[in-house]
Image: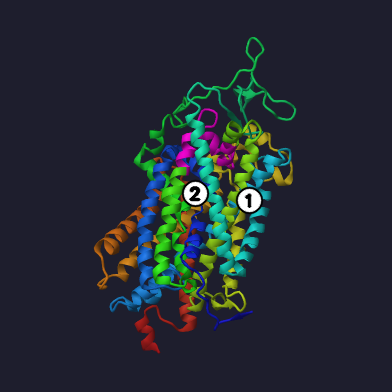
């Protein structure tokens, strides 16, 4: 089934390369999955849009580096391969070529091996949200059962890996179709959400969302005073089927809900943007930085196409163009438009805290705008149709990441810097099948960890919401009390930050590698090969540092970044031990020159 003499075939043109990269950046998936995480990250949520702009500038600087390196060294392995070639082609640096490529390759695995696990975890979350929307007596849409989400994560991890195992041409065809569908669907939602805000000025009759029934209502809710956690609280009056009851005026008529756009609540917590200018404003430099460190998750992937150099028909021409084009289309257009619309939509009927406490706030918004535009009750149908495209987008982004990660592992396996079995191709499909299936297993485990305490930390549900959960192994096992869950780290955020640590490390090293590539090169350009890589290096380093410094300055939480740092340090320590053992076993020295003298 595998043969070390088999090589990959060049079958991809510019369109195929670009679509593979665009699938990994997938705005249809990430608007849905990261909005809740960004909303829950402390008081920084008002700066969500501008944080994406900063992250985009950082990624563009890094993308230029990848594009420039791909012009010199097209091949399989992406930054791992670039690091080796950059050092081998410099007289003073070439003895360190082996060490450089291992550091870059090993560091990239912190990103490529965690990231797809986060993706399949999110597929589990969305699966729970959709099941809860269709069968609310079985599952809560706002707070799906952890065990059910884990089951979905495992199933999709192996299912998507099977598509990757079948070959790159099949993967590309899937990604082209997915890109067209998901971009069209999310632009439609963005237009409808913006239209909803423009057509509902303050004081007009609008909808408010009820998280327990996952439905929108155009009336004020009837409430009664009740003791919750020893405090008198207004509790919504509900029918036997949990449907909230509308408030009635003195004449017995239903009181319509009138929308407002308050910026803060009584305690100073952010609620909504009072105007469009507030959406794009920085609000606070530290907030922007925090949001940028989270938003990096939605923009990564442009570099994936550089791992497909051997499968490209004209790698030196097409790969650099695909890198930049994929980031500009997805990041500079799709994300900025979609995130503006989602933030601008926020109103008194659906505030930022409501979004932070939901498994899928974008799905909630779709229900509301669908009811407003298509008619009462049709918002759920609109949301289900949009959710289908999100499912496709998540499959595409996970597929693209597994293809990329497996090819980096394959390149290291061929060089004996990873177990040699990873360096073999399937005799029929010409795919690094052993690396793919290893990544499938890792993704399944990471996915389960990602959703184990998805509502931990700042996203912990209120006790009233926990008490309203349907009882059952699939729907409520894993939930305790608000205080206990608030004390636990948010596992989705922890896994995302650990992946982001790997991203920042990889991008930082890649910017440095680009400077080495073009040092004293005849095609050296000061802006492209020094200024831009230096900015990318500093920006990536600053974002990584801010993960640790920010919480102590009052931005965000401490638990998740520190755990993510611990994971990164453990991975680095294991990498150094593995490198030492492999070197001893194969009798290879760290420096190429020393190795040659030994020989």
Q: Residue 426 at x, y = what percent?
A: 60, 76
Q: Residue 416 at x, y = what percent?
A: 49, 78
Q: Secondary structure at mark 1?
A: helix
Q: Residue at x 56, y 78 (%)?
A: 424
Q: Residue 279 at x, y = what percent?
A: 41, 36
Apparent side of residue 151 relative to residue 585 in the rendered image (left or right): right
Apparent side of residue 69 relative to residue 250 in the rendered image (left or right): left
Above or below — where is 598 with respect to 424? Answer: below
Specify whether residue 348 is painted magenta.
Answer: yes
Q: Main secondary structure of the magenta part?
A: helix
Q: Which mark is residue 341?
A: none
The magenta segment: 338-366
Q: Residue at x 63, y 51 (%)?
A: 124
Counting residues from the start of the chain, the first of labels 1 and 2 encountered is: 1
Q: CA distance from mark 1 to mark 2?
A: 21 Å
Say whether residue 346 is visible. no
Identify the residue under disc 2.
Answer: 560
Observer-nearest of 8 and 240: 8
Identify the residue under disc 1.
Answer: 124
Observer-nearest of 521 and 341: 341
Crowding around mark 1 (Cα neighbors within 10 Å: few <14, some 14 to 19, many 20+) is many
- The quarter of the picture where residue 518 lies is bottom left
């Amino acid at each position: 089934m595998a043969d070390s003499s088999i090589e990959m075939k060049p079958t991809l043109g510019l369109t195929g390369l670009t679509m593979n990269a665009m699938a990994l950046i997938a705005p249809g998936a990430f608007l849905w999955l990261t909005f809740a995480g960004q909303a829950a990250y402390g008081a920084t949520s008002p700066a969500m849009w501008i944080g994406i702009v900063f992250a985009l500038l950082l990624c563009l600087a890094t993308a230029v580096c990848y594009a420039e390196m791909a012009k010199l060294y097209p091949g399989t392995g992406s930054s791992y391969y670039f690091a080796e070639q950059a050092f081998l082609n410099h007289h003073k640096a070439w003895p360190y070529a082996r060490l450089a490529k291992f550091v870059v390759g090993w560091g990239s695995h912190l990103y490529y091996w965690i990231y797809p696990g986060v993706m399949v975890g999110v597929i589990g979350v969305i699966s729970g949200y959709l099941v809860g929307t269709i069968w609310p007596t079985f599952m809560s849409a706002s707070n799906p059962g952890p065990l059910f989400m884990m089951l979905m994560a495992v199933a999709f991890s192996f299912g998507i890996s099977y598509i990757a195992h079948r070959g790159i041409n099949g993967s590309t065809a899937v990604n082209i179709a997915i890109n067209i569908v998901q971009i069209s669907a999310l632009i439609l939602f963005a237009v409808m959400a913006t239209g909803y805000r423009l057509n509902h000025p303050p004081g007009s009759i609008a909808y408010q969302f009820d998280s327990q029934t996952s439905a929108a209502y155009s009336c004020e809710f009837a409430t009664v005073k009740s003791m919750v956690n020893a405090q008198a609280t207004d509790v919504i009056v509900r029918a036997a089927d949990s449907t909230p009851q509308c408030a009635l005026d003195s004449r017995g008529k239903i009181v319509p809900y009138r929308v407002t756009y308050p910026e803060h609540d009584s305690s100073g917590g952010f609620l909504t943007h009072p105007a469009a200018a507030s959406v794009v404003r920085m609000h606070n430099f530290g907030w922007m930085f925090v949001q940028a460190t989270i938003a990096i998750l939605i923009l990564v992937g442009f570099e994936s196409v550089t791992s497909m150099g051997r499968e490209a028909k004209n790698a030196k021409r097409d790969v650099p163009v695909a890198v930049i084009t994929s980031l500009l289309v997805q990041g500079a257009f799709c994300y900025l438009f979609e995130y503006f619309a989602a933030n601008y939509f926020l109103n008194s009927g659906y505030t930022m805290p409501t979004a932070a406490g939901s498994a899928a706030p974008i799905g909630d918004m779709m229900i509301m705008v669908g009811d407003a535009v298509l008619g009462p009750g049709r918002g759920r149908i609109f949301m289900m149709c949009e959710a289908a495209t999100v499912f496709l987008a998540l499959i595409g982004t996970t597929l693209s990441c597994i293809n990329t990660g497996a090819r980096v592992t394959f390149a290291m396996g061929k060089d004996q810097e990873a177990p040699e079995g990873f360096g073999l191709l399937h005799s029929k499909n010409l795919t690094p099948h052993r690396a793919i299936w290893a990544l499938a297993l890792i993704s399944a485990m990471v996915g389960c960890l990602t959703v184990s305490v998805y509502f931990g930390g700042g996203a912990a549900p209120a006790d009233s919401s926990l008490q309203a959960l349907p009882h059952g192994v699939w729907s409520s096992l894993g939930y305790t009390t608000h205080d206990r869950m608030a004390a636990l780290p948010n596992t989705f955020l922890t896994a995302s930050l650990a992946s982001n640590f790997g991203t920042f490390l990889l991008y930082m090293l890649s910017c440095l590698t680009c400077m080495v590539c073009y040092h004293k090169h005849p095609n050296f350009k000061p802006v492209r090969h020094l200024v831009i890589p230096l900015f990318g290096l500093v920006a990536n380093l600053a974002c990584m540092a801010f993960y640790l410094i920010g919480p102590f300055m009052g931005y965000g939480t401490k638990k998740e970044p520190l755990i993510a740092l611990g994971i990164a340090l453990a991975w680095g320590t294991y990498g150094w031990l593995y490198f030492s053992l492999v070197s001893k076993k194969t009798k290879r020295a760290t420096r190429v020159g020393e190795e040659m003298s030994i020989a």
